[in-house]
Image (cartoon, rainbow, N blue to C red):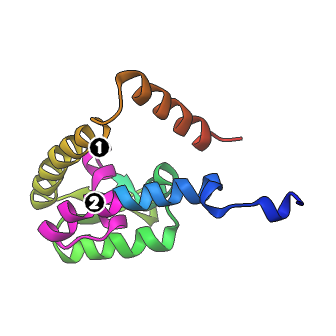
């Protein structure tokens, strides 16, 4: 039997990682979508602003590995729902600083608590050692090559 015919999609690591990420993301989606009507990219933008303070869209793209088009759409949606504001960077009018509003900050605080609880529940089925190894393996996979 040739190596090609032995290939099983269910054993293909990118496929397994994608399925695991999608399954866990869909479970957590209930927190931000049901409560705030946000899409995945929107909550990620909100979390970066809540965690790191005022940022430009370009900085969020670099920090989150999100495409600029997706970030732009998320920023517009969050601005329309009054979760963030934009202000022109005085030294470079081509860029805008994004800031959470008080409503955005409240959503961040609420969703941060939900994320911590979700993560704790997600990891509860793993021993402390398994959690450490899983985290190390995932970090190794996402590290620049």
Is 26 magenta? The answer is yes
Image quarter of residue 121: top left
Residue 63 visible to an observer of this rendering: yes
State the extent of the magenta-drawn residues as a range.
Answer: 25-54
Residue 6 vs residue 111: left or right?
Answer: right
Residue 84 vs residue 94: left or right?
Answer: left
The residue that appears at 14% across and 57% down in the rendered structure is: 107
- Badge number at residue 62: none
Percent x, y of residue 27: 27, 60
Looking at the rendered image, the quarter that the C terminus falls into is: top right
The residue that appears at 18% across and 42% down in the rendered structure is: 117
- Determine the secondary structure under disc 2: helix
Q: Which residue is mark 1?
A: 122
- Are the residues tagged 2 and 1 within 8 Å (C-beta)? yes
The residue that appears at 52% across and 59% down in the rendered structure is: 18
Q: Residues within 10 Å of mark 1 (few under 14, many from 20)?
A: few
Is 90 magenta? The answer is no
Name above or below for residue 72 compared with residue 90: below
Q: Nearer the viewer, residue 114 or 137?
A: 137
Among the two numbered marks 2 and 1 on one chain, the one whose residue lies closer to the N terminus: 2
Q: Residues within 10 Å of mark 2 (few under 14, many from 20)?
A: few
Image quarter of residue 129: top left
């Amino acid at each position: 039997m040739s190596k090609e015919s032995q290939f099983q999609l269910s054993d293909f690591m990118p496929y397994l990682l994608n399925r695991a990420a999608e399954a866990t993301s869909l479970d957590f989606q209930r927190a931000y979508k049901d409560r705030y009507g946000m899409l995945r990219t929107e909550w990620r933008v909100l979390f970066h602003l809540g965690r790191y303070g005022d940022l430009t869209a370009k900085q969020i793209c670099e920090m989150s590995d999100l495409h600029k088009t997706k970030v732009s759409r998320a920023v517009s949606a969050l601005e329309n729902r009054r979760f963030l504001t934009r202000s022109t960077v005085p030294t470079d009018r081509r860029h805008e600083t994004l800031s959470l509003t008080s409503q955005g900050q409240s959503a961040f605080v609420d969703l941060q608590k939900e994320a911590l609880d979700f993560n704790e529940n997600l990891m509860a089925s793993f021993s402390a050692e398994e959690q450490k190894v899983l985290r190390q393996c995932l970090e190794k996979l996402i590290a620049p090559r």
